Image: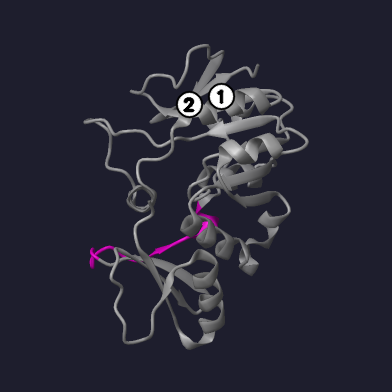
Amino acid sequence: MMPPVAIKSDSLNAGQANALATSLDLRLLEDHQMPAGPFLLEFKGDRLMLHMTGSPRFRPWIVDLRKHRRSKGRDPLLRAMGPGAGHVVDATAGWCVDAVHLAVSGFRVTAVEQDRVVAAMLKHALDQPVNRELVDRMELVHGDSTRVIPGIRPRADVIYLDPMYPGHPKSPAPRKGMRILRALVGPGQDTRDLFDQAMRHAKKRVVVKRPHHADPIASGKVGETRGKLVRFDIYKPH
């Protein structure tokens, strides 16, 4: 179950905040009210910020899709997509770090995010004028990937999975965005059903992101590409 989240707004965004509170079934706070739960969504100017109310030193989280754009080079994620891949489904989008990277690198991306607050923040970011170039290459879908994937037509060339995984004693501390994501959505969904759906519906490849210390999500991988901290396991669909 999602932890309690409230919404607050400045006067310029009152209508937008009210609409979002209604669509997400969240409590809309007045100026004098304090959030009772651990999270607060706040409209301020053109920004939508997520506060962790119990951590005053934790600066508000803002989705900035411009930070996710990396150069190509010998990028292990891009190499894992394989030749001839045009359409990629990122079935575990999170903050869309990899989805944006794939989109600006030339792929057409369907990013699927199950959590309603994360999806709302992503949509708000995509609606900003600075990100209009992404709209032609990246579609955001809010929903359960195990239900979304079978309905995607035509089928995607590659289905990409980046499931949450437990840390390792020698791993660096997770970045701020991942810490917020884990606190907001929990440990993540059961990935076996999602992997099985991906294997049934991808046309060319299923790619699974894993840390170096982790076992493969399933047997039968046909290849991998490696980065500094993670690898991308490659599977041939059924």
The residue closer to the viewer here, 222 or 121, is 121
Q: Position of residue 119 (x, y in %)?
A: 53, 56
The label number, if any, that marks residue 192 in the structure image: 2
Residue 141, visible in the rendered structure: yes
| Residue type, label 1 | Asp
Q: Position of residue 38 (x, y in %)?
A: 29, 63
The label number, if any, that marks residue 44 in the structure image: none
Give how far apart the Cα atoms at labels 1 and 2 are. 6 Å
Dot 2: element: helix
- Quadrant of the rendering where the C terminus is positioned: top right
Dot 1: element: helix
> Which residue sits at x=50%, y=79%?
45
Asked if disc 1 and disc 2 are in contact, CB closer than 8 Å, the reply is yes
Q: Quadrant of residue 110?
A: top right
Would residue 56 be counted in the magenta stretch? yes
Q: Position of residue 21 (x, y in %)?
A: 49, 71
Q: Main secondary structure of the magenta part?
A: loop
| Residue type, label 2 | Arg
- Residue occupied by mark 1: 196
Q: Left or right: 146 with respect to 211?
A: right
**Residues drawn in magenta:** 54-67
Above or below residue 12? Residue 149 is above
